[in-house]
Image (tube, rainbow, N blue to C red):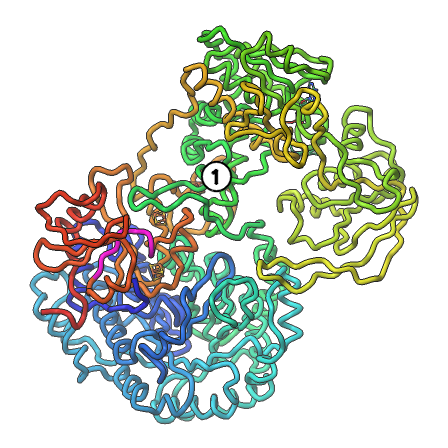
Amino acid sequence: MSDLMRPLSFGHLMTWALEEYARDGSIFGVKDNQFWRPAPGRLITDSFGDRLASPVGPAAGPQTQLANNILVAYLSGARFMELKTVQRIDGEELRNAVAKPCIQAEDEGYNCEWSTELTVSEGYDEYVKAYFAIAVLGKELGLGSVDEVAFNISVGYDLEGIKGDKVRPFIDAMVDASSTPIFRECQAWVEDHLMELSHFTREDLDNLSPQVSRSVTLSTMHGCPADEIERIAMHLLTEKHLHTFVKCNPTMLGYQFARDCLDRLGYDYLSFDDHHFTEDLQYADAVQMFGRLTAQARKRGLTFGIKLTNTFPVAVSRGELPAEEMYMSGRPLLPLSLSLALRLSREFDGSLPISFSGGVDAFNIKEILSTGIQPVTVATTILKPGGVTRFRQLSSLAAEIMADYQGIDVDRLAALVDEVLNDERYHKRYREKVQSRKTDSPLPLTDCYKAPCQDGGCPIHQRIPEYLRLSAAGELKEAFEAIAFDNTAPTILGVLCSEPCRDHCTRLDYDQSIDIRGVKLAAADGAQDAFVAAMRRPALLTDHKVGIIGAGPAGIAAAVFLRRNGMDVDVFEKLEGPYGIVKYIIPGFRITREQIERDYQLAVQLGVRFHFSCEPDYSVEQLKKTFGHVIIATGSWGKCPSPVQEGQDNILDAIEFLWQANNEGGARVGKRVAVIGAGDVAMDCVRTAARTEGVEEAVLLYRRTEPYMPATQHEVNLVRSEGLAMDELVAPISYDGTTLRCEEMRLSDEDADGRRAVIGRGTFVDLPFDTVIGATGATVGTGAYARNGLAQNSRGMAAVDASFQTSIQHVYVIGDGRLGPSSIVRAVADAKSAVRAILHNEHLSVDYDTRPQKIAREPLEVHGRRGLLIAEINGKAEGDRCLACDVICEICTEVCPNRANVAITVPGFADPRQIVHIDALCNECGNCGTFCPHAGLPYKDKITIFWTSEAFEDSTNVGFLPLTEGVYLTRLPDGSVREHRVDHEDLPDGMSQVLAAIEEDHSFLFAAPVGAQS
Ligand SMILES: Cc1cc2nc3c(=O)[nH]c(=O)nc-3n(C[C@H](O)[C@H](O)[C@H](O)COP(=O)(O)OP(=O)(O)OC[C@H]3O[C@@H](n4cnc5c(N)ncnc54)[C@H](O)[C@@H]3O)c2cc1C
Ligand code: SF4
Ligand code: SF4
Ligand code: SF4
C-alpha cells in the first residue's frame, strides 16, 4: 500500500468501462440506473458562457484528480467539472508535503490536501482522458454530448508558477489540446475501436473540439497578497483570454463574524485565531480589485467572477488529521459562503457572477440556484455514502429550476441567508450527538456487509432492516413477529427506546437516521394485540424452574425468553404491578398505562407467573431450594449523589420527585423549580415539574453546555420545544431551601481527546428556588447483594462473569442492578445473555440465536436508493428510506474519490459481491475508513490487487501481484508472501474464489498501469 496513484491509460480506462458495463451494467461501480439522463436539448448558458445540461459538478478536489473520478461524476449527473488544482509544486514533492490520511468527512468535512498529487503533465493527461471518455460514453449511453459539459481549469497559487514551465503549457494545452500526445493517443484508441461502438461515429470523432477548457478558476493560498491575486487574474484574462474566476476565502468576512456565526450554529469547538483574517485578502481591497478586473474582462468580451468560497482554515485540535491546520468544508461553510455572497452581491448590485461551493446538497441546491448563483460545485456531500451518485438527485433538482445566467437576485439571496442562519439543519446538533458511525467489529477479508443499526447499534440485535422492509410493504404482522423475536417489550421500546441503533444508521450520513423506533411502534400498534391473542403456552422442556426478583424490563425480558424456550418461571416483585421504572417513575405523558399493559400481556400469555407486593428482603439461599436458577433484576433506585456541597438534605431526589408525581397525585414543589443534571432523567424531571400544579417556572441547570449533555438530542429537543429554560455553565454549590448558589463556569480549551473541561470563573449567582431536584444519576442499592453473600467489586456492585452469573453458581444479576442507571434495551440485552447461559446449562436451544437468512433484495432496487437524500420522516413508508445495508453495503466503493475499492460478483459467498482494493488508484486519503461500518479500514484490510512490485513491497495488505500468466505473488492473512500458481490449491478459502472471479470476469482489474505496459 502506498499513496502513489498510478493512473489508468486511456485504453485501460475505456476497456474497464466498456467491459464492466457489458458484464455488470455499471461503470466504475456506478450502475446504469444511477446514470443521469438529462432531457434532450434542455441547456442553459452559465455565467462563463458555457452551454450546460446542468450547472452542477464536483469542486476542484479529490473527486477531480483522476479521469475515472471525473467520468463517474459525469455519468451520475455532473456537467461542470472544476478540475483539481495544478501548481508548480506537484508529484512527489507535493505528495511528500501532504500527510495521510488527508480527508475526514464524518460530518463537516476537513482536509489537509490542496492540489493534484500527480505531476502537472500527468494531471493534464487525466483531464484529456476524461474529456474523451465523456465524449464517447456520453454518446454511447445516450447521456448527451461533451459540448454540454464544462471543464473548468483550476490553477494556483503564484504568478511565477502560473507563468512557469509546468503550468503555462498546461493552460495552453487545455485551450488547444490538438497537438498533445495524450490527445492523439485518445483519438487513436477511439479510431481503432469505432467498430465496437454503437453510437459514437467517425464524424463525432472528427468534430471533437480540441478546446477542452474555456474558463479558469484561480485558487489562492491563504496569505496571498492582494496585488499578486490581481496580477494573476489579469494575466489569465489578458494573456490567456480565459473567463476567470477568483476563489475568495471566508476570511473576508472578518474574524468576529465568522466566530459568531459558527458559535451560533453550535461549532464553538472549531479552533481558529484571527491571523488568516488579517493576512488574507481584505474585503475593501477585494471590492476595488473585482471592479477593475470586471472592467478588464468586459473590454475583452470575457467574464470575470468570483468563486465562493475557498477553504476555511481551522486548527487540528482533536486529532482529526495528521497536520496542524486543516481546511473545513460542508455544512458550516454554507452560512459563511452565502453570507459573503450576499455582501459582495449587494456591493455589486447583483452583477458580479458567483460560482458557488460550500455546503451545497440536495436540500438547498434549488434555493441556491434560484438566487441566480451558478454554477454550483460540491465536494463534501459526495465524500459521504452514496458518493458521486448524489449528482443524479442534484442535477435532477437543478434541472427543475435552472435558467440562463442573468445576475444575482440580491433580495432572494438575503432571504436565503436569513433562512440558513435560522435553519436547524445547519446547526451542529442536527446530526444528533454522533461522531463516528463505526462499530467495534473487525473488518472481515470477505463477506463484510453488515447493517450497523442491527449489529453494533442495537444491543439486542433486532432484525431492523427486515422489519423496516416488511413494515414499508404493509406486512405489519410479519414485521411484528420479526421484532418480537428479539424484543420482549416492543411497545415500550417503540415509545421509549434510547435508540443506540440510530447512532450507527447509514442514513445519518445522508440526511437523518431512520426512525427505527417509530416503525417498531407502528408495527406494535398494528399487530401486537392479534399476536398476543394468538399466543400459545410453550411446553415445559425441563423440570428446573427459574425464580426472578424484580418485574422491571430486565426481569420480564428474562421471564419471556425463558418461558418461550421451555422453562417454568416465577417473578417476584415488591411493587403492586409490573415494569418497574417504566410504570412507576417515567412520566405518564411519555408512555401510557395501556402501552405498558400491552407488553405485560406478552409475558402473561406465555404463562409466566407473577407475584406482586412481595416482601423485598429476598433470600437467595431460600430461593435456590425451589429454583434451579435465580435472576436478580432489582434495578437502580438509590438516591443520586448530591449536586451541592452544602444543604444536601434540602435537595429533592429525582426518583422521589417522579414517584410523587406519578403515584401520589403530584408533587408539591412551589412556584420555582430547578433541576440539576443533563441526562434523560433530568429532562423528564424538568418537563414533569413544568406540568406540576402551582409551578410557574421550571429550569434546568447544567455545568457544561448543551453539546455535552448526556441526554439524547431527542429528549433535549423536547425540552427546548416546550419552551423550558436550560441554563448552561452554572455549577450549584449550596442550597438552603430557598436560595441556590451557583458558580459561573466557562469551558476550557480542548484537550487531546477533544474534551473541554469546565473551569470555575470564581463568580457566583444566587437564584431563588422553592425546590431543587437532583438528577445526577441514581445509584444501585447494593445492601441486598452483600446480605445474600454475592461477591462485590470495588464499587459494591455484584461481581459477575460474561453471562452475568455472580459468585454464586446459577445466580445472575442483570439490568440496571448490574449496570447502574442505564436503558430498557440494555436491560433486555442483559436478560438475553443470562438466559442464553441458563438455557445452555439446561441443554435447551435458544430461539433468538437462530438467525434467519437475509431477505433477498433486488440489487438494482437497493442501488437505486443510493445517493438520494430524503428529508422527511415518511410515516408508514419510513422503512422505504432504509438502504438495506445488510444485503448490500459497498459504502467503501461509493465514498472512495478514486474508485479504488471495487465490488465484484464472486460465487460461493454469503454476500452477493466481494470488495477488492486496487492499490494503484488509492492515495490513502482515508475516506473509506471513516465510513466503513466495521472498525477496520477497507484500504488496508481488503484483498488488494497490485500492479507493480514496488507497490506490493511497500504494502502489508493481503493480496495479489500478477507476475506472469497464471502466476501471482501473494500475501496471505498471516503476513507470509509466496508465489501462487492458479492450478495449485494453496490459497486460503476466500482468496482463491476471489482470484478466480477476477481472472474469469474482471481481468481489467489486473491490467498493467501506465508506463508498465508491454
Ligand atoms: C426518569 C427515568 C426516565 C427514563 N427514561 C428512559 C427512556 O426513555 N428510555 C430508556 O430506555 N430508559 C429509560 N430509563 C431507564 C430505564 O427505565 C431503566 O434502565 C430500566 O427500567 C431498567 O430495567 P430494570 O428491570 O433493570 O430495572 P427497574 O425498571 O428498576 O425494575 C426493577 C424492578 O425490581 C423491583 N425490585 C427492586 N427491589 C426489589 C426487591 N427487593 N424485591 C422485589 N422486587 C424488587 C422494582 O420495584 C422494579 O419493579 C429511565 C429511567 C428513569 C429513572
Ligand atoms: S439504512 Fe437501514 S439497514 Fe442501514 S443502518 Fe439504517 S436502518 Fe440499518
Ligand atoms: S481506497 Fe480509501 S483511502 Fe484509498 S483513495 Fe479510496 S477512499 Fe481513500
Ligand atoms: S464499507 Fe466496504 S469494506 Fe466496509 S463493510 Fe461495507 S462493503 Fe465491506
Does residue 525 appear in this view?
A: no
- Tell me: residue 245, above or below residue 331: below
* 942 in magenta: yes
Q: Is residue 72 left or right of residue 325?
A: left
Q: In front: 253, or 634?
A: 634
Report the front residue among 338 and 845.
845
* 330 and 334: which is toward the camera: 330
Q: Is residue 420 above or below residue 679?
A: below
| Mark 1 within 8 Å of ligand 2, using the beta carbon | no
Residue 587 sits in quarter: top right
Residue at image position (42%, 74%) is 114
Q: Which residue does the image show at 67% across and 20% down from the upper left?
A: 788
Q: Residue at x 32, y 57 (%)?
A: 36
Quadrant placement of the C terminus: bottom left
Q: Indicate left or right for 220 with 713 as reference.
A: left
Left or right side of 94 for 870: right
The amino acid pointed to by label 1 is Glu
Q: Which residue is mark 1?
A: 878
Q: Which residues are magenta?
A: 940-946
Whether residue 188 is situated above or below residue 236 in the rendered picture: above
> Where is the N terminus found, in terms of image quarters?
bottom left
Quadrant housing residue 859: top left
- For the question of whether residue 279 can be seen, the reply is yes
Image location of residue 222, percent across then percent down: 51, 81
Report the front residue among 182 and 558.
Answer: 558
Residue 186 image point, x, y percent: 16, 73
Number of on-image labels: 1
Return the x and y of residue 720 as percentages of the image width and height. Answer: 70, 48
Q: Element at badge 1?
A: helix
Estimate how packed mark 1 is, as few (under 14), some (14 to 19) or many (20 or more) residues with alpha carbons within 10 Å: some
- Asked if residue 727 is among those painted magenta in the image, a careful observer would answer no
Residue at left offset 40%, top offset 76%: 97
